[in-house]
Amino acid sequence: MENGGGIGTLQERSLHAAIKKMYAGPETQMEVAIDGYVVDVVRDGLLIEIQTRNFTAIKDKLFTLMKNHRIRLVYPIPYEKWIVRQSPDGINEISRRRSPKQLGIANVFEELVSIPTFLRHKNFSLEVILIREEEIRIQNGKGSWRRRGWSNSDRKLLEVIERHLYSEPSDFLHFIPNTLERPFTTNELAEVSDIPKRIAQKMTYCMRKMGILKIVGKDRNAYLYTT
């Protein structure tokens, strides 16, 4: 379930439900109790857990289940997001605009920093899906002061753009461009990959923990990495 808890979890949101439906089929089971946890989907012996928020909330669940079961964590990243404002009753649409913020597959490292070593376990895999989504906001007075009382009430799936499956650490090496000279710094990785430096820093951290990247020296105060 969406909060990563055990039996008796909160009701899921539309995005979580829509992605779960993607994995449904005649040979699948939904909401299955296994080892004290409720698993979203079980298909051919594979446990599929969908997490639309932070990985820290589901870390203990994944660690417990992967000891004895094959488990795949599915994580959606919004490449395109539409902000939809609705009336308090949720019936009428007041406004709709596209968010200027666009994320990419590399943003998975913002969450992966909490479980990078899990990819070294034979039973664990990660599927990242790039999506278009709607973020539904309702003015109920419970939102932050910046949003003037508007709070997020739901997320809805519009379209799946790409899907990337990572079954072992080496699968992540596609994030290191062939044009990047070795060894390299995080600044150079960020520049060549056209990603923010903070993402490059988390990427190198995760890859070191996975064992596919190593530090080979320093350039002034910056570490030098190579594959």
Image: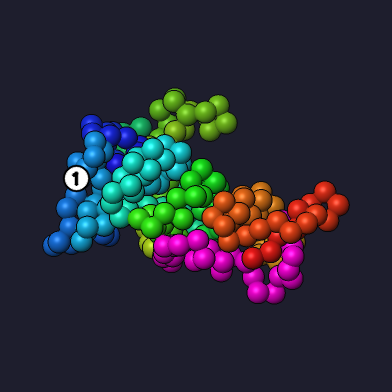
Answer yes or no: is residue 187 visible. no
Compared across the picture, whether 117 is left or right of 225 comes to left
Residue drawn at x 65%, y 74% is 178
Compared across the picture, whether 219 is left or right of 207 comes to right
Residue pushed farthest bottom?
179
Q: Which residues are magenta?
A: 162-186
Pinpoint residue 71: horizontal percent, then vertical percent.
32, 53
The residue under label 1 is which amino acid type?
A: Val
Residue drawn at x 46%, y 33% is 150
In front here: 101 or 29? 29
Above or below 141: residue 188: below
Above or below 44: residue 118: above
Residue drawn at x 54%, y 46% is 113
What SS does tag 1 mark?
strand
Compared across the picture, whether 7 is left or right of 187 comes to left
Pinpoint residue 77: horizontal percent, then vertical percent.
46, 54
Q: Quadrant of residue 133?
A: bottom left
Pinpoint residue 218: horizontal percent, then vertical percent.
80, 54
Which quadrant is home to the N terminus?
top left
For disc 1, the marked residue is: 32
In front here: 70 or 54? 70
How busy is the neighbourhood of tag 1: few (under 14 within 10 Å), some, or many (20 plus)?
A: some
Q: Quadrant of residue 125?
A: bottom left
Pinpoint residue 199: horizontal percent, then vertical percent.
63, 52
Query: In the rendered view, how is the structure colored?
Result: rainbow
Query: Does 175 lie within the magenta span?
Result: yes
Residue drawn at x 48%, y 46% is 115
In front here: 31 or 64? 64
